[in-house]
Image (tube, helix red, strand yellow):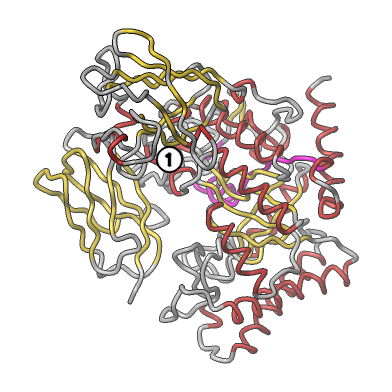
Amino acid sequence: MNKTSHLIRRLTFCLTAILTLIILPAATQTFCTGADLSFVNEMEDCGAIYYEDGAANDPFVIFGEHGAKIARFRLWHTPAANNYSSLADVKVSIGRAKAAGMQVLLDFHYSDTWADPGAQLRPAAWQQIDDLEVLADSLYNYTYNTLYQLHQQGLLPEMVQLGNEINGNILLKPDEPLYPNDWPRNVLLLQRAQQAVADINALAAAFIKTVIHIAQPENALWWFADAAENGLDDFDIIGFSYYPGWSVMSVREAAEAVAELRQTYSKEVMIVETAYPFTLEWDDNDNNLLGVDNLLPCYGGQPSPENQRDFLTELSWLVKEKGGSAVIYWEPAWVSTECGSSWENAAFFDFDHQLHQGIGFMDYDYEIKPAALDPVAVTFKVDMTGVDTSHGVFVTGDFTGQPWQLVPMQSAGDNIFSYQTTLPARSQGAYIFRNNNNWLDASRETVPAECALYWGNHRRYVVTDTAALMAFVWSSCNAIGGTAVAEWQRYQFEIFPNPATDALWVQSEEEISSITVYDAFGKLLKSNSFFPSQTVKMDVAELPSGFYFLKIITKEAKVITQKFLKYED
């Protein structure tokens, strides 16, 4: 089958899925890929030209031809900085997406700027509203009138997102608390937004679906449970963001969260934001938001266009297999221009704006399991020289199931004990060696802090797509044969408290020489240099509530980027 017929087949299936997915069992769902292209208009105005194989082309055409079936656009009420992400700007984007054959997911932020788990400020136009019913009416009218304008111009989206990463309370004044959730208030507001969409559907004989979007799969699990208990149910799609560096879940665990959400609530489930860096380099002076902490060990801890593509392809296949309907990449066209970018190292275009292999996840045939996800051989070995082995030697960990089991290891001679098994590729978990068939602390090895990467007292196994060997000396970070733990496995740091109010402490295995704070736009806010130390303090009292990024540089010139939440008492 040629590329054109393959894309036509996917488009036909995907359009059918959008109309019927909610009533279909998981086995008959069709999977789609997409991209948030909210920055394209601005980047082009800033001088960006996008190339494929050396030829300039419309980025919407590029994404459409490579299999993207959903284009997502954020909408701000009255943008504070410029006119991008305004309704006028979004109309242009929707028209371009539809011309390229893509469906549209319109992302109402219900704010004049970024809304996320650390900030949910209402538009300035609604700041003086104190009555909840009046605020709900304003929300209804704004949602309805926006969609009505789009309807009048033939630009209705296929899906609308009612808020962006709404983990906490929504539509807040600056002095109102983001947490804990005021469920009666939040449910009332979201239901009024849902009603506006329902009324437009009735008026226009349309089938716009509503999406509720939460940041990170681990948060989606508790959030939707609480929402259901409080009566929020009349929406169509569960959406969540999955950024590996900001989530506690592995790729496989994120896919399992998709399955749990779909099975629990019988709703369509999408990953509406994800990303992975293809390099750690910069192409401008803006801080990159995705750093080394967003590289997954199961992909070798190294960035490349190929690893970016493989992460996305394998995540998407796992999501599809667990009943998910789509994976949408966040901002693959936010390249560096004279306007700067905080995301050029995670785009699908290199620093010359040439399309690279990252986009390959969009036209992958998801009927075919990626070969890298096949089980691989894994061997655990431990050197027990000088340790009592009269009661046997055992290994236990996540790979043994829940609850953990003690697995006997076989003597391989020279005080080496071994256990061989097969594990899923692209997986990781905790493990530890024991010298008795019990769960007493006395029978557990004492793992040094530098390689106790789980809970401060357990080892971490990492499985890529090739055979793996976990071979260490008992109670040591020394690998059998004298090889130390891989550098990307060893480097650790800790930020606390997070969330923070007045001060933030950073502890690192390596001495820290400087820390820089950036806002969500990548704007530098403050920078401190330190006499190299493993523990440093950063004053954040003057920062408004919201999410920020720390760029931590060690004495050895290693760079770590970490997200933190600042909130007011």
Q: Position of residue 55 (x, y in %)?
A: 62, 26
What residue is drawn where x is 46% and y is 67%? 119
In this view, the residue in front, 260 or 237, is: 260
Q: Quadrant of the C terminus?
A: bottom left
Residue in the foreground of this view, choosing between 498 and 484? 484
Q: Residue furthest bottom?
A: 131
Picture residue at 29% right of the left edge, 13% below the top: 415
Label 1 sits on residue = 294
The quadrant of the image that shows the N terminus is: top right
Residue 141, percent from left and from top: 71, 79
| Apparent side of residue 128 relative to residue 370 in the rendered image (left or right) | left
- Whether 366 is among the magenta residues is no
Quadrant for residue 52, please give it: top right
Q: Residue at x 65, y 48 (%)?
A: 258
Residue at 51 percent across and 83 percent down: it is 127
Which is more toward the observer, 204 or 50? 204
Q: Is residue 567 above or below residue 376?
A: below
Q: Which quadrant of the view contains residue 224? A: bottom right
Magenta region, residue range = 29-49
For residue 108, which quarter of the picture? bottom right
Is residue 43 located in the magenta-colored stretch of the structure? yes
